[in-house]
Amino acid sequence: MTKTPSNPIRLIYAGGTFGSYGRPLAPLSADIFLPTLQKLLAEQTNANHLPQISWLDNDLIKDSSQLTPSDFVHFYQLLLAAYAQGDRRFVLITGTDTLSYLGAFLAEAFAGSDICVVITASMRPLLDSDVLQYYAIDADSDAWDNLTDSLKLAAAGESGVKIAFGDESWPAQTVQKIHSHDLMAFTGHSRAAYPANSYIKNLPDTRRQHWLDDQQELVSNIESRANQARIHALYCLPNDTEVMSNQLQALLSQPPCGIILLGFGAGNVPYSSPLAEALELAYKNGHMVVCASQSPFGGVSESYAAGSWQYDYHVISGGRLTIPAVYARLLWLLLRYDSPTRRRQRWLNNVNQAGTSIKKR
């Protein structure tokens, strides 16, 4: 039976600053923190008109800086299993270091569904470390506001994967961290195309089941590929061009992987014959090379000859995608599809939907 939006929101705790406590700060164990959080939520639900929640058991609780592709797949599988049982609305609490990467990955993985996932975190712990007699909410922390905003956003049930932080929310693949310790640590935007525009507001049961069947058929393959999936980043610096070509050459003997070229400005990458040859060989060996910008906003384009040359050597434009979104799309394609050709075709289809393709002169 399909559950209705009146069912409780499923809350997942995965670690991070949110659950840290003490002097010095350290994460509380799940068996201490989760009952404390449940008690606080129960006390606040009626007073603050919060939606009803239930807990989704999760045994992967760690600092988000330690997350790996296999961990990303863990959360994908956790959500997928609950979604298959009829749950539609979720709030996931994690850490800020890889929040934008995990959010963008889940957005790619659940494209085409009607799931509602809101991901949040905090820059300061929920609990006040100056209160030792009992656990109390720190009034100066952003954790409680971020959580309650996320619960209210999930209660609306709008399909898609979103990140809620600092009194704002955005489609997950547009979000990036822009400050290392300020409470307004993230930004994003609402002009999001694929995968945000792929979510279905009212998905018929038959179509939902077809979507689930397709995903569940590949879960074991996705899980096994996650152990070998590799995404590399090559950062352009004012070096001799030999530096980057040597870095790329060192990756060519590996199994097909994802490679992000972090270009200057609008995606400018210093040209050299050895680098061009290495890019050609990378393509022949099945690697996917995507150009992104070091600049936080604006993305890449072909405006300058200093950047446009690389697209003649099979580099894919990252368009306006953030670095976390480029990483997430590359990772999902490596996990989801079994051949370099299919991965490349799928990227180009997605990019055309997102309006981020490079137009040749």
Image (spheres, rainbow, N blue to C red):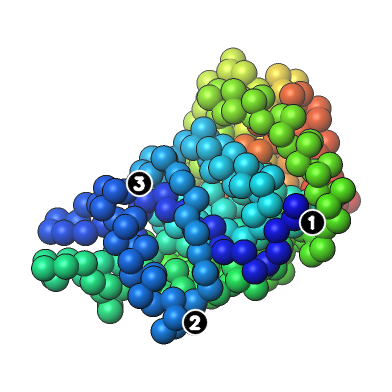
Mark 2–mark 3 Cα distance, whole angstroms, equals 31 Å
The amino acid beneath tag 3 is Asp
Determine if residue 22 is in view: yes
Q: Which of labels 2 and 1 is toward the front?
A: 2
The amino acid beneath tag 2 is His
Give the camera-side residue of 223 and 11.
11
Q: Quadrant of residue 241?
A: top right
What residue is disc 1 on? 198
Determine if residue 319 is in view: no
Q: Which of labels 2 and 3 is toward the front?
A: 2
Residue 351 got which mark? none
Q: Counting other residues with Cα less than 10 Å from the Cα at mark 3, is it few (<14), some (14-19), or many (20 or more)?
A: some
Q: Tell me where residue 184 appears, x and y as whole percent.
A: 42, 73
* Total tally of numbered discs in the picture: 3
Residue 49 got which mark? 2
What residue is disc 3 on? 63
Residue depicted at 87% across the width and 48% down the height? 206
